[in-house]
């Protein structure tokens, strides 16, 4: 997974450099809040919160890449998104399986509200 993320990140950096696109240099507010949330949990609660957030994040990534594939204006980014979507679907399936294994029955469910199994 680390290799896949690194490869995709390198490809995106190359496209950004070629097309003079400025990439963010720090986490956005949403991601900073997620890191803060993780830092306040431990053990099983961390596992459940992380599993829940991973599914939400993976779903959002797949949707964004599909949107770019179908509606993007930059041919390089459209090609990148199109070639990356299939690689995003397997981790999403794994994340959903992991979430179910932890007793979270819906990706919309707040794991903090679910009793540990």
Image (cartoon, rainbow, N blue to C red):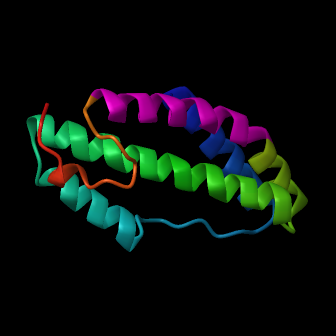
Q: Nearer the viewer, residue 58 or 83?
A: 58
Image spot of residue 30 (x, y percent): 37, 68
> Is 7 on the left or on the right of 79, as rendered?
left
Q: Position of residue 19 (x, y in %)?
A: 81, 64
Along the line of sight, which residue is nearer the eye, 21 or 101? 101
Residue 116, picture quadrant: top left
Residue 21 drawn above or below residue 63: below
**Number of callouts in the render?**
0
Q: Quadrant of the C terminus?
A: top left
| Residue at image coords 48%, 65% | 25
Q: Position of residue 10 (x, y in %)?
A: 64, 43
- Quick check: 116 left or right of 21? left
Q: Which residue is at 66% across, 33% downward?
A: 87
Residue at x 31%, y 65% (from the top left corner): 32
Magenta stretch: residue 69 in it? no
* Image-based side of 27 in relation to 74, left or right: left
Which quarter of the picture shows residue 4?
Answer: top right
Q: Is residue 96 magenta?
A: yes
| Region of the chain picked out in magenta, as a range | 83-101
Q: Main secondary structure of the magenta part?
A: helix
Residue 101: % across, % down = 30, 26
Tell which of 39 and 64 is nearer to you. Answer: 64
Image check: 65 left or right of 55? right
């Amino acid at each position: 997974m680390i290799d896949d993320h690194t490869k995709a990140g390198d490809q995106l950096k190359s496209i950004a450099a070629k097309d003079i696109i400025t990439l963010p240099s720090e986490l956005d507010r949403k991601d900073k809040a997620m890191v803060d949330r993780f830092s306040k949990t431990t053990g099983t609660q961390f596992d459940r919160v992380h599993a829940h957030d991973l599914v939400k994040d993976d779903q959002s990534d797949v949707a964004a890449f599909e949107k770019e594939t179908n509606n993007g204006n930059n041919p390089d980014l459209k090609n990148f998104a199109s070639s990356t979507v299939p690689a995003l679907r397997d981790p999403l399936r794994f994340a959903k399986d992991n979430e179910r294994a932890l007793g979270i029955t819906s990706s919309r469910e707040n794991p903090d509200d679910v009793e540990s199994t």
